[in-house]
Every structure is written in C-alpha cells, then in structure tokens.
Image (tube, helix red, strand yellow):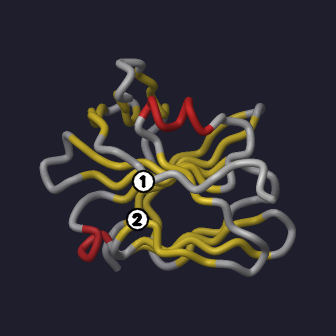
Amino acid sequence: MRARNDIAPSTLGVELHDYGVGVEYLDNRTTVYRGVPQAVTGTLATAPGKEVHVLVTDPTETEGVMMYVNDLTSHDEVLESSGVGRVILGEDEEEELFPGVLVRRVPGHRFEIEADPEVARGRVFVFVEDDWGEDSYEFVAE
C-alpha cells in the first residue's frame, strides 16, 4: 500500500517576476521559487533524491496547475487544501501530468521530464530542490 495517494491539482494563482515564480495556493499561502529559470528543451533529468514540482501556467500566465512528483512528506489533506496535486510513480513508470508534459521515474530515485509548451498551451516550469538548494527550469520550444 502506498504511503500517499495521487491527488488532482486545482487552479492556483501565478505571478512571474524577474527574480522568480510566485505561486498562491488555495489556502492563501504564497511561495516564490527563486531565481530565473534555466531554459531547457528535450528531456530534463534530475539528480537522485530531489523533490520535483511541475507548474504549467495558462496562456495568460496568471494561473496554473502544480504537481508534486513522488512527494511522500506532504499529507493528502494539506495538498488538497492548498490545491497542489501529486503523482506517485514506481520505478520505470511514467505519466502524462498535463497535456504535453510527461514525467518518468528512472532507476536511482531520479526523474526525467519532457514537455512541449505549445501542447501544454502555457509555460512549463520545473522546480528541483532539496535541503541544500533549488534549481528552476522552463521548457522552451526547440
């Protein structure tokens, strides 16, 4: 039995700044993923053991949906009240999080993310973090 469940995301407020990406949760909390996202095309491979958050904005770039990938620390109720979704993947499993956004778990507690912003119909951000820091990425058209 899984320690946590898959949870569907809700629409969240998004603010794009020159210093990072702000997200307003349904419970009125906000966070900023700091730093200008690094542009990426093709496949983004994460280092082992990192937390992975995927945000896709709408075309107006003022709203979006966010998924946590294999987050085992947040309780279901917390995610549901905040509007953040979650997907739990076993090794070698993959899932289309949103149209045009695919994530797969590869050996070694790593993930690969592929995204096509044109299919997603918005901007696609990936935030990869741990206790020592965070990295921000944005998928751009090739």
For label 1, the crowd category at 10 Å Cα-Cα, with few meaning under 14, some 14 to 19 and many 20 or more, is many
Q: Residue furthest right?
A: 108
Residue 137 rendering spot, x and y as whole percentages: 49, 54
**Residue located 61% across and 78% down the image:** 94
- Compare marks 1 and 2 and give the one earlier in the sequence: 1
Whole-angstrom CA distance, mark 1 to mark 2, is 6 Å
Q: Quadrant of residue 36?
A: top left
Amino acid of disc 1: Phe
11 up-or-down from 41: above or below: above
**Residue located 27% across and 33% down the image:** 15
Residue ID for mark 1: 125
Residue ID for mark 2: 139
Quarter of the image that includes the N terminus = bottom right
Horizontally, residue 36 falls left or right of residue 103, namely left
9 up-or-down from 99: above or below: above
Horizontally, residue 87 falls left or right of residue 130, namely left
Q: Quadrant of residue 101?
A: bottom left
Secondary structure of the residue carrying numbered label 2: strand
Amino acid of disc 2: Phe
Verify CB contact (< 8 Å) between mark 1 and mark 2: yes
Secondary structure of the residue carrying numbered label 1: strand
Residue 116 rendering spot, x and y as whole percentages: 35, 75
**Residue located 38% across and 36% down the image:** 21
Residue 35 rendering spot, x and y as whole percentages: 48, 36
Viewer-proximal residue, 75 or 22? 75
Q: Quadrant of residue 93?
A: bottom right
